[in-house]
Image (cartoon, rainbow, N blue to C red):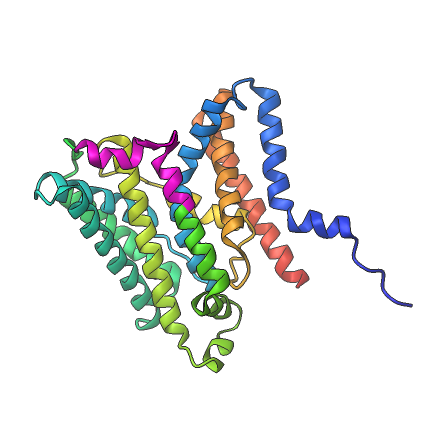
Amino acid sequence: MRPNPPSKVGDVLRRFSVFIILLIICLIFALGSGEFLTASNLLNVALQTSIIAIVAIGMTFTILTAGIDLSVGSLMALGGALAAGLAVRQGLGTFGGIGVSLLIGLALGAINGLLIIKGGMPPFVATLAMMAVARGLTLVYTQGRPIAGIEKDFVFWGTGRLLGIPMPVILLAIIATIAHVVLRYTRFGLYVYATGGNEETTHLAGVSPDRIKLAVYAISGLTATLGGVLLTARLWSAQPNAAVGWELDAIAAPVLGGISLFGGVGSIGGTLVGAFIIGVLSNGLNLLGIPSYYQQVIKGIVFILAVMLDLFTKRRR
């Protein structure tokens, strides 16, 4: 007897399961609060989600290679502090400060990659060390005090709007589009998936997996720094304790979106949906008046369920 062909309905449900979960969460909050589906609140959700989604896109590249980057929260704080300080204190101006900050973030991300591929450190250990180093450098540079006095052209990148759309949302759309094209339609993207799925495939293609890993950690450092710059612009100041714990959300977004922690599986679209699940959860729970400490518990449980689903899916493969 021939096995029964897979159900088309079941295939659709599996393919769009994460998006369906997002819709269900939105429906629950819409029923619980009349403010949830207002245009102003939905735009606020997009604004709140955009920064962590940008950081999560960089994280996606590392996870696709079966790695992880725990340093993104600290790199966000350092990037924001350097951009603000260089612009205000050293007189480099908005674009000079932001540009130098992004280059430093790129370099620190590359150092993460070197610690992993040349130093032989597990990604968890290397990026955990960088998390401590970057946070320490932030405190040293700021002397533990906020950096204020940021010019309006700097603040515009976090609070300004173009055609009514917040700038962080526009930047997210641009970065997500570029990342999607790179992963789906370039050889580099193919090698990223191959490195996470089977490094031998990358070797056979004549490409060193080490070079791919170096590149993806540099990308993660760059997007984390950009996220920190946008957060600083949104807050009108650089805070030395900014983005504490954001690495959890940056990891949770890809995992919730179907990116396998074992590498080689997932998409940028999935990461975006995962980021919006986190953003909608935070926004909806706030509207329902749920205290922040309970929200952390709920987010942690959701992350655990996502990892368990990833483990279950890997076993079925």
> In the visual, does 113 lie left or right of 196?
left
Residue 166 is one of the magenta-drawn residues? yes
User: In the image, residue 72 lies at what x, y percent?
Assistant: 34, 50
User: In the image, residue 181 lies at what x, y percent?
Assistant: 46, 58
For the C terminus, the image quarter is bottom right
Q: In the rendered view, would you say 49 is above or below 40?
A: below
Instruction: Work out whether residue 103 can be spotted.
Output: yes
Q: How many marks?
A: 0
Q: Main secondary structure of the magenta part?
A: helix
Q: Residue at x 50, y 48 (%)?
A: 271
For the N terminus, the image quarter is bottom right
Q: In the rendered view, would you say 181 is above or below 176?
A: below
Q: Nearer the viewer, residue 119 or 5?
A: 5
Task: Specify the farthest residue to the front.
Answer: 163
Magenta residues span 151-173
User: In the image, residue 305 lies at what x, y percent?
Assistant: 58, 45
Residue 215 is one of the magenta-drawn residues? no
Q: Residue at x 18, y 34 (%)?
A: 146
Task: Specify the farthest residue to the top.
Answer: 34
Q: Residue at x 47, y 61 (%)?
A: 183
Q: Residue at x 39, y 46 (%)?
A: 54
> In the visual, does 58 lie left or right of 205?
left
Task: Specify the farthest residue to the right.
Answer: 1
